[in-house]
Image (cartoon, rainbow, N blue to C red):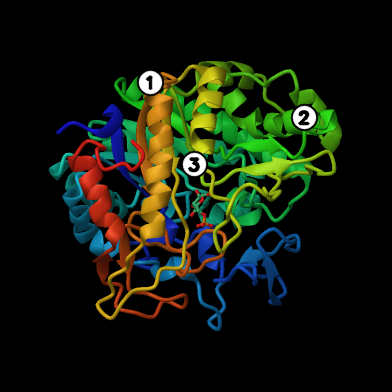
């Protein structure tokens, strides 16, 4: 079958937002298993215990006392524990995606299914078998599997014992995971993503450290860069045909006004965002790094061999998320987190305040290709909305169809007019899953409705929405159903 714009089309997910089965198949605890639900108004929290037995909780980006370890409070609801049960329903989900004609499925490996503590000598066979089954099910329908090796998560033991990525030992633990995955799945999986959105610094659950200061954060990031490069070096040896990339949050930013200082603020912000991909795709720290370190008052400890590792382990493709655009002004302070969320009077926003900006995706495709000249994958895009199912649990989600239509039209321009090589597109959460930022089910992205509420109540049965049939037609007609096309 011809594919619209000659690229792969699919769905994307992360294990802890999708799989569930958190105590099954020998799976160990992840940092995310301590993260409660939340909402747009109430931030998610991490629950923890101090050595003297005192329990507490802290907002994800808040401060957790030194020495605290993650713990589960029976009075809280933790969405990762059951999620939407892909663990038991993977056959049904993959069949639904296949019936739409999709050709790509991006999913995250749960590190603790493979190494329950992250420290074992040998991997957990039951965990590997689960991913064997998922991959084989994809291949049965000619769906190309794309693996995210680490999607914003860490084995709880590695976080608690070592302070997460602040400790260089994590590099070895991660590379060991890669070695097992490459040996096991390397002949079936071509596309690999080493890490998800390193340029979104989410704090404890992401980096596994209780310390949220700039020094610790950027030291963690250096270790992550080296780990990714080592994975690439290993992949060249074990899987010569494979392609490795990392995933970067790439929603573009616009200067808030044409004031020259806003332009300067914009350049500073873009460098903060590209700091990560500049190292991982070019193989060395860019010259502006020193300015960032000076501003943050930090210095990075690097081992003698790191320069060579970074240079040798550059990635093959740039993959990214693009949901929205933002603005930056001279009034903004970047701090550790370099993603300002200025509103834009020219754009409408979702109920969660994310501006809807289809042209941003064409812009970012061009911006990134100009910078790296490497192939691109759009691996997250989509509309988080409140769906209203009818009595048969059917959702007439015309707003999602409009969102996809308008974004696809811009991707088409980037590919056909601007000549940007885009290898594929995966919409976020093709089957509804749990929101990362708020922990809600109410914020839905999917083509397929999952009967489950914010507290996990419901059958978890799947119901295709109107957008499911629109997407199926988009693939079948090679994009002829695009409006305004
Ligand atoms: C990306 C993450 O940042 O955004 C996903 O990689 C996340 O894990 C997605 O789900 C959408 O964000 P949210 O908060 O709407 O789930």
Tell me which numbered mark, 1 or 2, is placed earlier along the sequence: 1
Q: Earlier in the sequence, mark 1 or mark 3?
A: 1
Image spot of residue 197 (x, y percent): 55, 42
Foreground pick, 305 / 355 = 355
Going by the picture, which residue comes out furthest to the bottom?
75
User: Is the CB of mark 2 within 8 Å of ligand 1?
Assistant: no
- First reached walking from the N terminus: tag 3 or tag 2: 2
Q: Dot 1, how many residues are within 10 Å of its Cα: few (below 14), some (14-19), or many (20+)?
A: some
- For the N terminus, which image quadrant? top left
- Circle 3 packing at 10 Å, graded few (<14), some (14-19), many (20+), is many
Q: Secondary structure at mark 1?
A: helix
Mark sitting on residue 358: 3
Rendering coords of residue 52 (x, y %): 72, 74
| 1 or 2: mark nearer the eye | 2
Q: Residue at coordinates 68% horizontally, 65% vertically from top-left?
A: 59
Work out how far the residue at label 1 is from the one at label 3, CA to CA, in angstroms.
36 Å
Q: Mark 1 or 3, which is nearer the eye?
A: 3
In the displayed structure, 242 sits above or below 35; it is above
Q: Which residue is mark 2?
A: 263
Q: Is residue 105 above or below residue 280?
A: below
- Report helix, strand or loop for mark 2: helix
Q: Helix or strand or loop: what does disc 3 sit on? A: loop
Query: Which quadrant of the view contains residue 461?
Result: bottom left
**Circle number at residue 308:** none
Res. 232 image quadrant: top left
Q: Is residue 145 left or right of residue 75?
A: left
Residue 407, can we see it? yes
> Label 1, on which residue?
236
Q: Toward which corner of the image does residue 290 lie, by quadrant?
A: top right
């Amino acid at each position: 079958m011809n594919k619209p714009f000659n690229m792969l089309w699919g769905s994307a997910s992360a294990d802890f937002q999708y799989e569930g089965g958190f105590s099954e198949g020998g799976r160990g605890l992840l940092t995310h298993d301590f993260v409660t639900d939340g909402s747009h108004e109430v931030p998610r929290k991490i629950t923890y215990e101090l050595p003297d037995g005192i329990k507490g909780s802290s907002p994800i980006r808040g401060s957790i006392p030194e020495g605290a370890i993650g713990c589960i409070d029976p009075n809280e609801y933790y969405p990762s524990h059951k999620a939407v049960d892909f663990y038991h329903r993977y056959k049904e989900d993959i069949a639904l995606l296949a019936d739409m004609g999709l050709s790509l499925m991006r999913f995250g490996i749960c590190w603790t299914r493979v190494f329950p503590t992250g420290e074992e000598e040998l991997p957990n066979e039951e965990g590997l078998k689960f991913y064997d089954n998922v991959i084989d099910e994809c291949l049965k329908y000619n769906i190309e599997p794309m693996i995210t090796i680490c999607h914003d998560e860490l084995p709880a033991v590695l976080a608690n014992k070592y302070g997460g990525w602040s400790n260089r030992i994590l590099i070895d633990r991660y590379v060991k995971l890669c070695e097992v995955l490459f040996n096991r799945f390397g002949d079936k999986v071509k596309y690999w993503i080493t890490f998800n959105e390193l340029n979104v610094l989410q704090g404890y659950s992401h980096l596994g450290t209780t310390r949220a200061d700039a020094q610790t954060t950027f030291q963690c990031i250096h270790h992550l860069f080296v780990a990714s490069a080592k994975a690439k070096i290993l992949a060249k040896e074990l899987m010569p045909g494979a392609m490795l990339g990392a995933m970067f949050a790439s929603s573009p930013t616009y200067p808030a006004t044409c004031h020259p200082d806003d332009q300067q603020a914009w350049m500073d912000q873009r460098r903060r965002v590209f700091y990560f991909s500049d190292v991982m795709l070019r193989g060395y720290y860019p010259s502006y790094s020193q300015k960032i370190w000076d501003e943050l008052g930090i210095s990075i400890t690097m081992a003698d061999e790191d320069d060579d590792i970074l240079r040798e382990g550059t990635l093959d493709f740039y993959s990214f998320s693009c949901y929205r655009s933002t603005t930056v002004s001279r009034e903004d302070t970047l701090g550790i987190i370099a993603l300002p969320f200025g509103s834009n009077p020219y754009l409408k926003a979702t109920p969660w305040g994310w501006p809807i900006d289809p042209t941003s995706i064409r812009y970012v495709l061009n911006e990134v290709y100009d910078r790296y000249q490497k192939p691109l994958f759009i691996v997250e895009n989509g509309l988080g909305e409140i769906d209203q199912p009818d009595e048969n649990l059917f959702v007439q989600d015309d707003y999602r169809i409009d969102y996809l239509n308008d974004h696809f039209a811009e991707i088409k321009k980037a590919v056909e007019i601007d000549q940007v090589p885009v290898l594929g597109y995966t919409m976020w959460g093709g089957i509804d899953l749990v929101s990362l930022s708020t922990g809600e089910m109410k914020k839905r992205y999917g083509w397929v409705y999952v009967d489950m509420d914010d507290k996990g109540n419901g059958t978890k049965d799947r119901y295709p929405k109107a957008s499911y049939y629109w997407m199926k037609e988009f693939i079948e007609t090679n994009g002829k159903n695009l409006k305004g096309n």
